[in-house]
Image: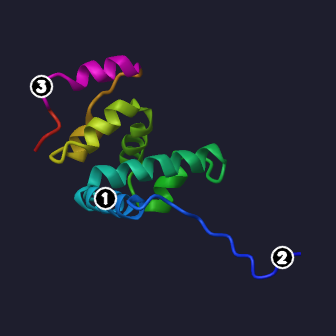
Amino acid sequence: MKRGYKKQIITPLDAPQAFSEEACREREARESVKDSALLRALGLAFYWQRLLDEQRVASVAEIADAEGMGLTQVRRIKRLTLLAPEVIEQLISTPDAVLEQVVRRPWSNVWDDQMHDLKLPDRFLS
């Protein structure tokens, strides 16, 4: 039996500095992304969808009552869950995207069509 044995991890000399630089870049990237109304709405939409999927709520009407919102507004926001991932990325990377214009727009159910529509002249900006 060995006593006083201690495990030690040996890394290259520049690893701690590289890690520090990468952590700094990630922190700056997180700080540059502002919590926009669109981002908050996307979070709500996916949260509500999970509540429905897990049958923790019975309907969109129940969500509207619980949130103190109109049924139409809840339905519009919840439709954000049907957007293609590429469309969501494009919208949240557009700092001037206006939530109300995004949720009121009639989106196609086909993701490829959504991407094509997104490339048309930008109607989501203020």
Horizontal and vertical percent for residue 64? Answer: 46, 54
Q: Residue at x 30, y 23 (%)?
A: 115
Q: Earlier in the sequence, mark 1 or mark 2?
A: 2
Q: Residue at x 68, y 70 (%)?
A: 7
Q: Which residues are magenta?
A: 110-122
Mark carried by residue 117:
none
Q: Is residue 111 covered in magenta?
A: yes
Colour approach in the figure: rainbow
Q: Are marks 1 and 3 in contact (CB under 8 Å)?
A: no
Horizontal and vertical percent for residue 63? Answer: 51, 54
Inter-mark Cα distance, 1 to 2: 46 Å
Q: Are marks 2 and 3 in contact (CB under 8 Å)?
A: no
Judge the density around disc 3: few (<14), some (14-19), many (≥20) Cα neighbours within 10 Å. Answer: few
Query: Label 2 belongs to which residue?
Result: 2
Of residue 41 and residue 119, the one placed in the foreground of this image is 119
Seen in the image, is 3 located left or right of residue 27?
A: right
Query: Label 1 belongs to which residue?
Result: 30
Of residue 53 and residue 39, the one placed in the foreground of this image is 39
Q: Earlier in the sequence, mark 1 or mark 3?
A: 1
Mark carried by residue 121:
3
Judge the density around disc 1: few (<14), some (14-19), many (≥20) Cα neighbours within 10 Å. Answer: few
Q: Disc 3 marks which amino acid?
A: Pro
Q: Quadrant of the C terminus?
A: top left
Q: Disc 2 marks which amino acid?
A: Lys
Quarter-wise, where is residue 18 in the image?
bottom left
